[in-house]
Amino acid sequence: MSLPIHARTRVKICGITRKEDALHAITAGADALGFVFYEPSPRAVSAAQAAAIIASLPPFVSTVGLFVDAPAQQVHATLATAPLSLLQFHGDETEAYCQQFQRPYIKALRVQSGDDVAARMREYPSAAAILLDAWHPNQPGGTGLCFDWQQVPKEMSTRVVLAGGLSASNVADAIRAVRPYAVDVSGGVESAKGIKSAEKLIAFMAGVQAA
Ligand SMILES: O=C(O)c1ccccc1NCC(=O)[C@H](O)[C@H](O)COP(=O)(O)O
């Protein structure tokens, strides 16, 4: 039996740094929250900060821990402190690296023009989903940039979490173009880096529902 997974598009709000933002995101209807464990990011949190936010959440909310080419020991130590439902790997991690933590994981791929996205996605058969994001030479994520949605292989869209430059103004078009399993947003729902806006979260969710 095939599941009707397109009955609605799931939403992950990434770069949560404050309890109030987490609760605004959930109240607006988000399914998942992302915590950035990458020190150079303006949205970085410690494992203890993430654990405190997660402890304040209602049930049935997925929590995603994001890493960029982190030493395995850092991922293990974070998991020991923060109860994360999934891991997200945003660097050049191999499938063998991603699998070693025995947790469901999302592999992020940063898309450049000319990329064979289908071939890159096939390198991670064990991933729970593939997050497709925009490529930038100096920033591994959270760039606020879109990539060309036509590059998403249509036959694989049920595995895709679409990210990169999404906001209330373009998320409905993005969903209609790609029909992804989920969308992911960070900068498009912020009032400042790492600070989410309740109004922008509500507007973003309305855009998702309009698609
Ligand atoms: O958000 C960050 O600062 C970040 C830093 C390093 C790696 C990944 C990062 N974010 C990952 C995400 O999942 C973002 O939501 C995704 O890149 C989209 O960001 P945006 O274009 O700002 O919506």
Image (cartoon, rainbow, N blue to C red):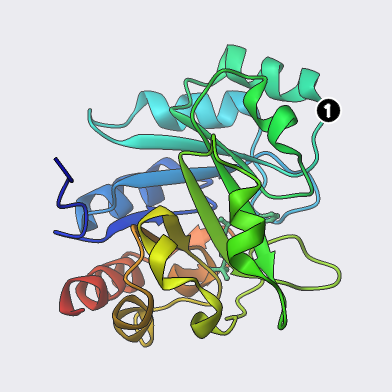
* Quadrant in which residue 151 is drawn: bottom right
Q: Position of residue 111 (x, y in %)?
A: 67, 71
Q: Position of residue 120 (x, y in %)?
A: 66, 58
Q: Above or below — where is 173 with respect to 78?
A: below
Q: Residue at x 34, y 29 (%)?
A: 56
Query: Would you name the residue on which mark 1 appears?
Result: 71
Q: Residue at x 25, y 72 (%)?
A: 208
Q: Residue at x 59, y 55 (%)?
A: 121
Q: Type of residue at label 1?
A: Pro
Q: Above or below — where is 94 with respect to 144?
A: above
Residue 193 seen in render = no
Disc 1: CA contacts within 10 A as few (<14), some (14-19) or many (>=20): few
Q: Position of residue 47 (x, y in %)?
A: 62, 26
Q: Position of residue 51 (x, y in %)?
A: 50, 24
Which residue is more in the foreground, 206 or 4? 4
Identify the image quadrant of the N terminus.
top left
* Quadrant in which residue 2 is drawn: top left
Identify the image quadrant of the C terminus.
bottom left
Q: Residue at x 49, y 29 (%)?
A: 104
Secondary structure at badge 1 equals loop
Ligand 1 quadrant assignment: bottom right
Which residue is more in the foreground, 85 or 53? 85
Q: Above or below — where is 169 with respect to 185?
A: below
In the image, taking residue 192 as reference, residue 94 lies left or right, namely right
In the image, taking residue 177 as reference, residue 136 lies left or right, namely right
Residue 190 seen in render = yes
